[in-house]
Each structure stands twice: as structure tokens, then as C-alpha cells.
Image (tube, rainbow, N blue to C red):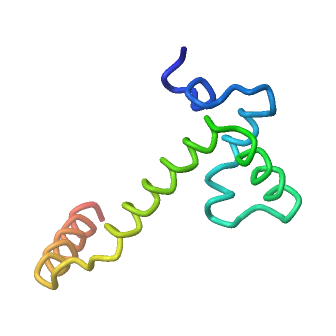
Amino acid sequence: MNENDPSATAGNCGNNCADALDRLWEYLDAELGAPDAETVRAHLAECEGCLEEYDVDVVVKTIVKRGCQEAAPDGLRLKIHEQLTVMRITQD
């Protein structure tokens, strides 16, 4: 089993697990056309392993989204801006 291959931990039901998992993030982000989205949706309905992978990806996406909603404090933003300006001046 290859830990870097999502299909190795998914269902491997023979119903195009690799294809479904390759398109999973696009499906989650609603970036697939209707026919492709329906293909992934139908596969998830049939394959428990891929559905579990989908559930994990939903949780990860939710956590990342929550973490990205915070704004940096003004002082930190100013320090970063100053450092970028210094770096730009010293490289020119």
C-alpha cells in the first residue's frame, strides 16, 4: 500500500476510485461541470472508501477556511510591509 496514493486508502471498489479521487477537490469546490460532478457524486454514493476520503477532505477544507478568515493584526501587517520594503530596496 502506498501512503501517498489516496486510492490506496479508498475503496478500490473497481468503479474508478482513482478518477473520483483525482477530481475530489474540484468537486468540493464546485469546479466540475454537471456531467463530471454527477459522475463523482454517483461514485461517492456507491463507494464507502471514497466517501470516507470525501468526508476527511471536507473537514480539512473547513479547517483551512476557518483559519484563513482571521486577519493579521495591524502591527504585524506593518512589520511585514516594512521588511518587504527593506528587502526590495536592498535587492535593487
The foreground one among 50 and 92 is: 50
Q: Look at the image and tell me in which quarter the C terminus lies.
A: bottom left
Count the marks: 0
Q: Is residue 27 shown left or right of residue 79?
A: right
Q: Look at the image and tell me in which quarter the N terminus lies.
A: top right
Q: Is residue 45 shown left or right of residue 5?
A: right
Where 48 sits versus 55, above or below? Answer: above
Where 30 sits versus 81, above or below? Answer: above
Residue 8, percent across and down? Answer: 59, 23
Where 35 sits versus 73, above or below? Answer: above
**Which residue extends farthest bottom?**
74
The foreground one among 55 and 63 is: 55
Who's the residue at 79% across and 26% down the image? 14
Residue 9, percent across and down? Answer: 55, 27
Residue 29, percent across and down? Answer: 62, 64
**Which residue extends farthest top?**
1
Q: Is residue 38 shown left or right of residue 66?
A: right
Residue 40, percent across and down? Answer: 76, 50
Who's the residue at 70% across and 38% down the image? 47
Where 30 sits versus 44, above or below? Answer: below
In which image quadrant can residue 7 be found?
A: top right
Q: Is residue 62 shown left or right of residue 37?
A: left
In which image quadrant can residue 49 be found?
A: top right
**Which residue extends farthest right?**
35
Who's the residue at 75% across and 41% down the image? 46
